[in-house]
Image (spheres, grey):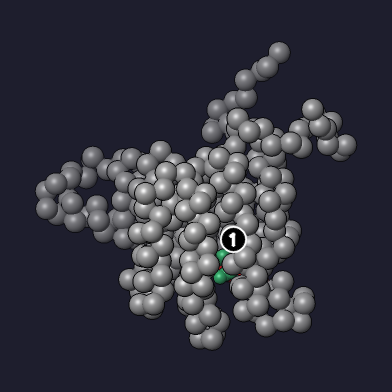
Amino acid sequence: MFFNKKSPSKSTEVDLTRVPKHIAIIMDGNGRWAKSKGLPRVAGHQQGMEVVKKITIAASDLNVKVLTLYAFSTENWKRPAKEVGFLMKLPTRFFDTFVPDLIKNNVKVSVMGYIDQLPLETQKAVEQAVEQTKNNTGMILNFALNYGGRAEIVTGMQNLAQQIQTGALQPEQIDEQRISDVLMTASLNSYRDPELLIRTSGEQRISNFLLWQLAYSEMVFLDQHWPDLDAEDLKQAIVIYQNRDRRFGGIKEDKK
Ligand code: IPE
Ligand code: IPE
Ligand code: MG
């Protein structure tokens, strides 16, 4: 048993029996990482892509069931066209080099977001990776690409309104389950809501990510920029999660 010096009762080793099944990550700080090295922002995105590969394998090795990565938000279109252009080319580069490893590790790619609004080349790269890994039965690597939590809720509500209009649904039948069913995480079934949200680079906000699904997620904010993250940092975040008391509005059982 290992102990952290500062808080002797808290373990610093991952308890492999209590690894979160769904981990969501806001991969932040690529630009600041590059700037700190005197490099253009896109160099941070390039390095960030390599880190996605490492963290994917690390999460899969820890037996995580779903890893959702926030890769491009519906708000990121506000960035300069050159940076957006670079980000749109990343999926092609990523999957060109990484699909064999994904297959070797039994990882299945999925994607959520407004994919039809992406450049055709980007759509093709993503669709191909989904197709090439569709028979894998291990971890789901779920990319949030052109994703926004509010937009997702708007689309979901339109879906419910249409069901009501056609008579398929009565307003009083709308409940949390039916709302969850029309969101972009629906295909993740019992793993829809992440137990753990990690954001890198010191920013402590949600930035329109998984607004509904994060209702009871534990949030861990790491100071490191995404391109500096490694498997040990992921494990550290999981240990922090494992040392939290998740009460869901209830009270903690007295263990005496
Ligand atoms: C995260 O890094 C990547 C994307 C949002 C696509 P940033 O590009 O936001 O990096 P910072 O936050 O400007 O440092
Ligand atoms: C959130 O990061 C989006 C992604 C990581 C894809 P941002 O860098 O866009 O968020 P803000 O602008 O700092 O809130
Ligand atoms: Mg950022």
| In the rendered image, the vertical position of residue 157 relative to residue 9, given as above or below | below
User: Which residue is identified by label 1?
Assistant: 52
| In the rendered image, the vertical position of residue 228 relative to residue 6, given as above or below | below
The quarter in which the C terminus is drawn is top right
Q: Nearer the viewer, residue 45 or 224?
A: 45
Say few, some or many: other residues with alpha carbon within 10 Å of mark 1 (under 14 / 14 to 19 / 20 or more).
Answer: some
Residue at x 81%, y 32% (from the top left corner): 2
Residue at x 83%, y 36% (from the top left corner): 4
Type of amino acid at the residue the image marks with label 1: Val
Residue at x 67%, y 83% (from the top left corner): 40
Question: Is residue 132 shown left or right of residue 92?
Answer: left
Q: Nearer the viewer, residue 103 or 32?
A: 103
| In the rendered image, the vertical position of residue 190 relative to residue 129, given as above or below | above
- Residue 175 in view: yes
Residue at x 47%, y 76% (from the top left corner): 88
Measured as percent of width and height from the top left, residue 85 is found at 49, 82
- Residue 203 in view: no
Measured as percent of width and height from the top left, residue 45 is found at 61, 73
Quarter of the picture for ligand 2? bottom right
Quadrant in the rendering for residue 236: top right
Q: Which SS class for mark 1? A: helix
Question: Is residue 161 shown left or right of residue 194?
Answer: left
The quarter in which the N terminus is drawn is top right
